[in-house]
């Protein structure tokens, strides 16, 4: 009986990476750093696959006007990206910045922010509000793409064994956004947080994306609120209705940072605030 | 496997385990500047530049660095050189304990590599991932801007210091004023009022300050700054002994349980394991783990390893193995059969009938009522409280709560034990109390004191958490069991589950006041939660009463404390030591009274606060060192109020427009104030010793027992010696805290070091000065009359001079040879109170209840600031630590007694870019009982922020929060109730 080192691999290509990750006899996971990193000694796996050679860190806009973020793009790259600062008032940059401090942002990745259940929710919220799609790869020929909010809703069952989050993408559009959050200190893991993104045309909301964390067991996209807003002009009454919907759907789990009652109330306050700010940026408020 | 990377420009090849952290690998390779502070990347102390980017290395596997470039501070400078960034940090006083300094230097380098003209925000952002518990980030941020200017080739101003005028200076040639009789102020010694001999400087009336000091009062660079800024191996863990074993501790998963059986056979058989110890293997010796003077205050309710566990995180077993990995694996093989017992977590429930009895062992010593979990009660009174309350126009009664704040020094508890060549046990440990550790360890391991040597290297912060013999006994037991060096270090999680914290307290004040705003009576009751063991509990509760009942003139005072055991991590010493608890209650109720009676809260405080000549009667009733009457001899409180109020613009409080922000309609602004008054050392108890000897070149070795835990006490003591001996600071080589080499000192606690240890150093230096003068008189064939020492020379009354070097050579080699040297010790029956005025500005979100603090200002009268930079550094850093307790910091438990806040991020300490603007103002006075007029500064910054924030929240919203930390929901609930 001895202490066996866990394996470390740095594959040169995807074929090798998937071969390693899909082994059934050795529990193998990709090395992915969350903005709330786990201690190395707490990582439950027998082997690690370092994806640094697979060039998964790009942030770019494609010909079909979609923005693509590689799963291994660091949160610092997200924060610094001029491309992302130009989308929805830079809501995603702000979310990346608030999720972790500089040193951790240099290691934590988009995949880390979206796949670790205890991650700060901000990046997921911003991306859900941006109507993002997530692409997962089990093998070179086996990828699947699904709406991010469905991926988040699946919780710890979202990723199949061996699967890697390779990309998140969303449509680039003239839009306005805002992130509203409450915590003990400004960069505290939000007790409750809401993200809103609006696209407008002819003085009305053309599309709204609204997401909320801290008021349900997992971060959620508020499709009912989005539907309510679609095609409407901004008004205090509309915001009240949106807030009421957010509060009504909330099923919070209370803890020492916020009770059930508080979290439910904050769902309304922060959804309203995020929407109001986004609409104000859009010139509709 | 082998990895290759560039380390500080050099191709490096290392053999590493595939799953070891880059942090471990770099330290094994000798890069000791890379520090362990946590395991989750959140403290940032382990950061390096990886391909130019700042990254924490504890969350990276070593093989991930293969093929990359790594920079550490070891690469920034050579022997005798210093990088401009390091120079800026050194000059600016940005280094306190220095444990996180290498990471800060690298963060600065990464920033300045891409930004030549950084803004304040850039600097804060760059430091955001390096948690600093000492500085409040104020001086490090300034240092970044200074470094940037230096790297741009600009002239930078010399550091001017924090504010004590250099003309405030004393005692160059006079005899020591320490230990002399203090005049009876009350009966006419000084008329009871302060006399201003200079504008802004208040001194006791019988003192005649001299015109000049050369070293004292100057912003000298810390004597340890250069080694710390260069990341030299100066800390406990920065050595690697041949054959060293790694200890690991198994802790209890239950809040309360009896160990029915424990089977360690599999762990013992595990290859690479050298010893596994449980309660069956070590002698059962009762002790109290708090590092305090002999005999340690009771109860003595702990043993090294027990058959009962009393909190989640309590010791179950400890083992030593050849690698940390083997140690961790072997722990999993220990089989424990627990009989789980009911637990009690609330001190208000712990004394009720039917509550589980936490200390049912028959051999505990000195628990007054173990059946009721009652650790101690304290009662003290001055005057007739009931009668006075009955005479008052108004009586107010309120209850407040202060939380279980954790010290979170970035260097965890760490110690290395080994046999030396004389078969004496050496304990190299990160402690504030090396001499107490030696004495307390002796009976536990069965070695006489003379066979134990305790060495304290540099400490990466303590804040009271290391005023404790926390882990040394277990490491020593393992060295005794294996005859091998043993290294034992807590993980960050263990710091939260198995170290110490502030005692949570429920504080009830009843105050009697007259219509004209004169306070007449204060009645204070405390329920204190000491957790599973009682160390420090009586003295901490006592200080809560002492500090809660000293600040305001009252004719009647009463204090009652009850301290209870609970099944939580034991509390202990934490900067402030009961004062932040007592002061939160006092400064909150005073604010409430002022509001109710329609007084300005600042004026109400001025009206009732103590002043020069006032007695501090409660100290006689509560003093740890016996009943010694205390009188205020120096007090700059009025000026503290004036200066800090001006800095925060207190008048805005009365401008309704200022309270609102048209751009952010949900925000309300407010201002709050708190008076601060602390103590300096424990009168009649604290003692420190110092030795001074002269070398051939006129330099001096100074050996002190005092324990610099990052505060700069080595520097301050060296300044006192240099001033007394007329030499430069660099002529003083100071060595501290080694039980074999230095005189005794109680250790670094109770705000005592400058006053007590500095006092002993001054006395020893004065005796050396006397010997130098005698030698000079012999050499110059004159008498010592009128002689003085200055500029490395002895001057005679008739203007002749001889250099200190010539004096030394003459004395050591030429005639009537002798070593010029002296040893002295100092104790004080007087504990002069420093004073302070704390102001904060808040912004409260009226919809969420979230409180943001944009600005804090504290003015402190610490007598003479021996070093204004280190003194202001204490005030800046202390305020931010106190803000943590006000806003976010509290160790939290679930209903089963499991700690929920086991990471730095969850526990929540302010990061550099979240921290407010913090201002420290030094208000100089002269304290006649202190060396060169000094009194304490270390703890007082903890006292006022909590109440000042709560008072500011009230000003902003009308909501009175009586429970810290002020989480958003508490304010939100208050707002709902107002509606």
Image (cartoon, coloured by chain):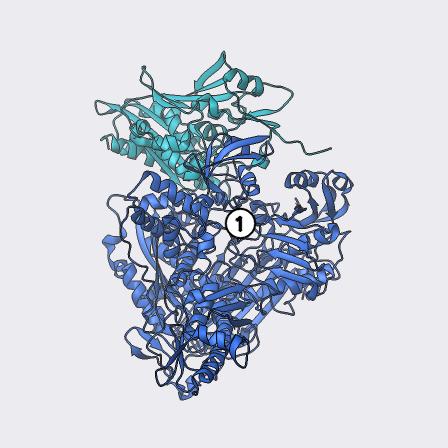
Residue lying furthest top? A141
Q: How many marks?
A: 1
Mark 1 surroundings within 10 Å by alpha-carbon count, few (fewer than 14), some (14 through 19), many (20 or more):
many
Query: Can residue A115 be seen at all in this image of the molecule?
Result: yes
Could you tell me which residue is drawn at 45 percent across and 26 percent down?
A72
Rendering quarter of residue A29: top right
Q: Where is residue B200 drawn, in percent x and y?
A: 30, 73
Q: Check the picture and name the quadrant holding the C terminus of chain A.
A: top left
Height in image: B738 above or below A119? below
Query: Can residue B305 be seen at all in this image of the molecule?
Result: no
Height in image: B747 above or below B15? below
Any idea which chain is the cyan one in this picture? A
In the foreground, B420 or B600:
B420
Residue lying furthest front? B814
Which residue corresponds to mark 1? B891
Q: Where is residue B70 drawn, in percent x and y?
A: 46, 37
Label 1: chain?
Answer: B
In the foreground, B129 or B528:
B129
Q: Where is residue B618 drawn, in percent x and y?
A: 50, 75
Q: Check the picture and name the quadrant holding the N terminus of chain A.
A: top right
In the foreground, B689 or B556:
B689
Any idea which chain is the blue one in this picture? B
Q: In the picture provided, is B288 more to the left or to the right than A193? A: right
Height in image: B470 above or below A145? below
In the foreground, B955 or B215:
B215
Q: In the picture provided, is B222 more to the left or to the right than B646? A: right
Label 1: which secondary element? loop
Could you tell me which residue is drawn at 54 percent across and 72 percent down?
B691
Q: Where is residue B851 drawn, in percent x and y?
A: 38, 49
Q: In the picture provided, is B308 more to the left or to the right than B549? A: right
Rendering quarter of residue A242: top left
């Amino acid at each position: 009986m001895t202490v066996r080192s866990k394996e470390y691999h740095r594959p040169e290509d995807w074929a090798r990476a998937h071969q390693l990750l899909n082994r059934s006899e050795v529990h193998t996971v990709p090395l992915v750093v969350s903005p709330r990193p786990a201690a190395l000694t707490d990582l439950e796996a027998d082997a690690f696959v370092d994806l640094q050679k697979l060039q998964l860190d790009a942030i770019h806009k494609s010909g079909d006007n979609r923005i693509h973020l590689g799963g291994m793009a660091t949160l610092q790259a997200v924060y610094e990206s001029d491309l992302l600062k130009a989308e929805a008032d830079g809501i995603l940059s702000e979310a990346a910045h608030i999720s972790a401090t500089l040193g951790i942002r240099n290691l934590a990745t988009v995949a880390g922010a979206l796949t670790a259940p205890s991650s700060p929710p901000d990046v997921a919220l911003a991306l859900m509000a941006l109507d993002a799609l997530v692409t997962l790869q089990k093998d070179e020929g086996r990828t699947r793409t699904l709406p991010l909010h469905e991926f988040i809703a699946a919780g710890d069952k979202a990723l199949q064994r061996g699967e890697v989050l390779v990309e998140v993408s969303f449509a680039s559009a003239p839009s306005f956004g805002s992130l509203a959050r409450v915590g003990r200190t400004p960069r505290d893991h939000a007790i409750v947080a809401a993200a809103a993104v609006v696209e407008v045309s002819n003085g009305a909301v053309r599309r709204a994306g609204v997401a909320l964390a801290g008021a349900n067991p997992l971060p959620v996209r508020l499709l009912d609120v989005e539907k309510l807003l679609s095609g409407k002009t901004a008004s205090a009454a509309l915001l009240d209705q949106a807030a009421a919907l957010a509060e009504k759907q909330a099923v919070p789990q209370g803890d020492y940072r916020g009770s059930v009652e508080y979290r439910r109330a904050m769902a309304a306050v922060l959804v309203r605030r995020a929407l109001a700010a986004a609409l104000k940026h859009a010139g509709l408020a | 496997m082998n990895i290759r990377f560039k380390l500080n420009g050099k191709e490096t090849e290392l053999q590493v385990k595939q799953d070891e952290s880059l942090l471990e690998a770099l330290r094994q390779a000798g890069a000791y500047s890379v520090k362990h502070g946590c395991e989750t990347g959140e403290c940032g102390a382990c950061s390096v530049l990886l391909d130019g980017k700042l990254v924490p290395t504890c969350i990276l596997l070593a093989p991930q660095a293969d093929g990359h470039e790594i920079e550490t501070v070891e690469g920034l400078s050579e022997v005798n050189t210093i990088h401009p960034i390091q120079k800026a940090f050194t000059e600016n006083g940005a280094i306190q304990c220095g444990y996180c300094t290498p990471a800060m230097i690298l963060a600065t380098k990464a920033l300045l590599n891409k930004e030549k003209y950084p803004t304040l925000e850039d600097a804060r952002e760059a430091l955001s991932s390096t948690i600093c518990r000492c500085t409040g980030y104020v001086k490090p941020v300034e240092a970044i801007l200074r470094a940037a200017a230096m790297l741009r080739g600009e002239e930078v101003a010399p550091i001017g210091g924090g504010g004590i005028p250099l003309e405030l200076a004393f005692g160059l040639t006079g005899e020591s004023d320490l230990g002399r009789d203090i005049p009876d102020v009350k009966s006419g010694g000084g008329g009871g009022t302060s006399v201003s001999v200079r504008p802004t400087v208040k001194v006791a009336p019988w003192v005649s300050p001299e015109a000049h000091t050369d070293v004292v009062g100057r912003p000298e660079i810390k004597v340890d700054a250069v080694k710390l800024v260069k990341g030299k191996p100066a800390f406990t863990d920065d050595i690697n002994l041949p054959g060293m074993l790694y200890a690991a501790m198994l802790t209890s998963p239950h809040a309360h349980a009896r160990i029915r059986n424990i089977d360690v056979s599999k762990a013992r058989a595990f290859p690479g394991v050298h010893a596994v110890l449980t309660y069956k293997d070590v002698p059962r010796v009762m002790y109290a783990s708090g590092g305090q003077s002999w005999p340690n205050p009771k109860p003595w309710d702990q043993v090294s390893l027990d058959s009962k566990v009393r909190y989640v995180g309590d010791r179950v077993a400890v083992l030593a193995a050849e690698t940390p990995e083997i140690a961790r694996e072997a722990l999993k093989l220990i089989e424990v059969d627990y009989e789980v017992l009911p637990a009690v977590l609330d001190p208000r429930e712990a004394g009720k009938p039917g509550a589980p009895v936490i200390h049912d062992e028959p051999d505990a010593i000195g628990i007054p009522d173990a059946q009721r979990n009652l650790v101690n009660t304290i009662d003290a009174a001055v005057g007739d409280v009931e009668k006075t309350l009955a005479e008052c126009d108004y009586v107010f009664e309120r209850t407040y709560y202060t939380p279980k704040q954790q010290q979170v020094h970035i260097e965890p508890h760490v110690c290395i034990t080994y046999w030396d060549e004389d078969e004496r046990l050496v304990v190299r440990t990160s402690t504030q109390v090396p001499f107490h550790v030696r004495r307390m360890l002796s009976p536990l391991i069965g070695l006489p004191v003379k066979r134990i040597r305790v060495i304290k290297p540099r400490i990466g912060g303590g804040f009271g958490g290391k005023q404790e013999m926390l882990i040394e006994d277990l490491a020593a037991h393992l060295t005794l069991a294996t005859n091998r060096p043993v290294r034992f270090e807590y993980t960050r999680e263990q710091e939260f589950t198995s170290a110490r914290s502030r005692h949570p307290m429920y504080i009830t004040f009843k105050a009697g006041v007259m219509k004209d705003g004169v306070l007449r009576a204060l009645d204070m009751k405390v329920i204190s939660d000491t957790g599973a063991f009682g160390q420090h509990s009586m003295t901490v509760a006592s200080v809560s009463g002492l500090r809660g009942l000293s600040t305001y003139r009252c004719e009647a005072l009463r204090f009652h404390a009850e301290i209870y055991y609970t099944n939580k991590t034991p509390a202990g010493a934490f900067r402030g030591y009961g004062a932040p608890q007592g002061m939160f209650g006092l400064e909150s109720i005073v604010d409430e009274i002022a509001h109710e009676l329609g007084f300005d809260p600042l004026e109400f405080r001025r009206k009732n606060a103590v002043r020069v000549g006032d007695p501090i009667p409660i100290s006689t009733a509560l003093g740890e060192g016996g009943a010694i009457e205390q009188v205020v001899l120096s007090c700059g409180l009025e000026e503290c109020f004036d200066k800090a109020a001006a800095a925060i613009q207190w008048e805005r409080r009365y401008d309704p427009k200022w309270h609102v922000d048209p751009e952010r309609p949900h925000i309300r602004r407010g201002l709050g104030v708190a008076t601060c008054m602390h103590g300096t050392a424990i009168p009649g108890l604290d003692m420190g010793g110092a030795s001074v000897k002269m070398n051939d070149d006129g330099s001096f070795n100074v050996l002190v027992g005092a324990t610099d835990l990052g505060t700069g006490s080595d520097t301050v003591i060296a300044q006192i010696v240099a001033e007394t001996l007329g030499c430069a600071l660099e002529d003083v080589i100071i060595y501290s805290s080694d039980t074999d080499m230095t005189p005794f000192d109680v250790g670094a606690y109770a705000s005592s070091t400058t006053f007590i240890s500095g006092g002993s150093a001054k006395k020893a230096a004065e005796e050396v000065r006397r010997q130098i003068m005698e030698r000079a008189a012999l050499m110059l064939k004159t008498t010592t009359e009128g002689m003085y020492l200055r500029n490395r020379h002895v001057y005679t009354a008739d203007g002749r001079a001889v250099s200190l070097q010539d004096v030394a050579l003459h004395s050591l080699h030429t005639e009537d040879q002798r070593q010029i040297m002296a040893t002295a010790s100092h104790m004080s029956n007087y504990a002069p109170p420093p004073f302070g005025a704390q102001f904060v500005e808040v912004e409260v979100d009226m919809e969420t209840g979230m409180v943001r603090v944009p600005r804090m200002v504290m003015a402190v009268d610490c007598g003479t600031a021996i070093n204004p930079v280190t003194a202001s550094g204490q005030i800046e850093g202390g305020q931010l630590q106190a803000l943590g307790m006000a806003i976010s910091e509290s160790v939290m438990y679930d209903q089963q007694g499991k700690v929920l806040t086991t990471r730095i991020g969850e526990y929540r300490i302010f990061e550099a870019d979240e921290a407010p603007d913090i201002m420290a103002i030094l208000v100089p006075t002269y304290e006649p009982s202190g060396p060169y007029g000094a009194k304490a500064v270390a703890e007082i910054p903890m006292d006022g922020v909590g109440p000042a924030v709560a008072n500011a929240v009230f000003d902003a919203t009308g909501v009175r929060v009586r429970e810290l930390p002020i989480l958003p929901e508490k304010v939100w609930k208050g707002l709902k109730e107002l509606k």
